[in-house]
Image (cartoon, rainbow, N blue to C red):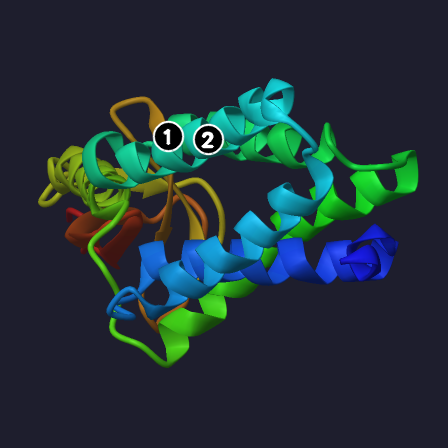
Amino acid sequence: MEWLDIEIFGFLVVFLATMLFFGELLVKAKGIFGIIGFALITLYFAHHIGDASGLWVIILYAAGLISIVIDGKVLGDGTLSFVGAVLMIIGLTVPAPGLMYAFLVGFAVMLGALASFFFTKVFPRRELWSKMTLKETMSSEEGYNSMNEGYSELIGKEGIALTDFRPIGTIEIEGQAYSATTGASWLEKNTTVRVTSVDGTRIVVSPQPKNT
């Protein structure tokens, strides 16, 4: 298998193997991607590792792959996946016959991992890293709701327009300045206004009649 001594072929083998391994983790491919990826990476290690003394790099690579699986199924925060990717790169670059070969192999791992996401456009997705996605969604919703609840306390309160409204301006309520809008109408500075509604950070006000 002298052709695997050529840098570009080593790059292609590692790229395809990584893309298929990660594709197997991301989508429901019935194990086909995993089998082909395993065959390719076995081909790579079989050629570049001459005896049993080099088995530790295979163990390092396998540990990296297992770390990514554990992160996707259990932890879901991406930290262990990053460590796993580093272990995979080290496991593949150490037996490389040259510096440029090692660089291309390391780049192939990163590129293959990114390319695997194209499979999600075609095949049904697995539920890996769903905890991280759910956490981000919940954090976003909690932040929005917290902000909405804070500003909702302003509804019904009166304040003063610190600037002209065209139709957006600044109001002051109880010594605190807020950005607000009338929705459509224009107001002059120093007009007394009342907060009529709040939607997130959008505060809607209306002018109040002057006392006679």
Element class at badge 2: helix
**160, above or below 204, in the image:** above
Q: Where does residue 1 sit, x and y in percent of width and height?
A: 76, 58
Residue at x 11% of width, y 35% of height: 153
Please give the residue where the numbered disc 2 appears in the rendered image: 64
Task: Using the image as rendered, state which of residue 11 and residue 77 is in the foreground.
Answer: 11
- Left or right, residue 53 beside residue 164: right
Which residue occupies 42% across, 27% down? 63
**165 or 32, which lies in front?**
32
Q: Are marks 1 and 2 in contact (CB under 8 Å)?
A: yes
- Residue farthest along the bottom direction in this orientation: 122
Q: Position of residue 145 (x, y in %)?
A: 16, 42
- Judging by the rendered image, the residue that carries numbered circle 1 is 67
Query: Which sits in the foreground, 110 or 104?
Result: 104
Q: Position of residue 23 (x, y in %)?
A: 41, 62
- SS of the residue at dot 1? helix
Q: Nearer the viewer, residue 135 or 158?
A: 135
Kind of residue at badge 1: Ser
* Residue 59 visible in the shown view: yes
Q: Is residue 6 above or below residue 110?
A: below
Cα–Cα span, label 1 and label 2: 5 Å
Q: Residue at x 55, y 27 (%)?
A: 87
Q: Amino acid at mark 2?
A: Gly
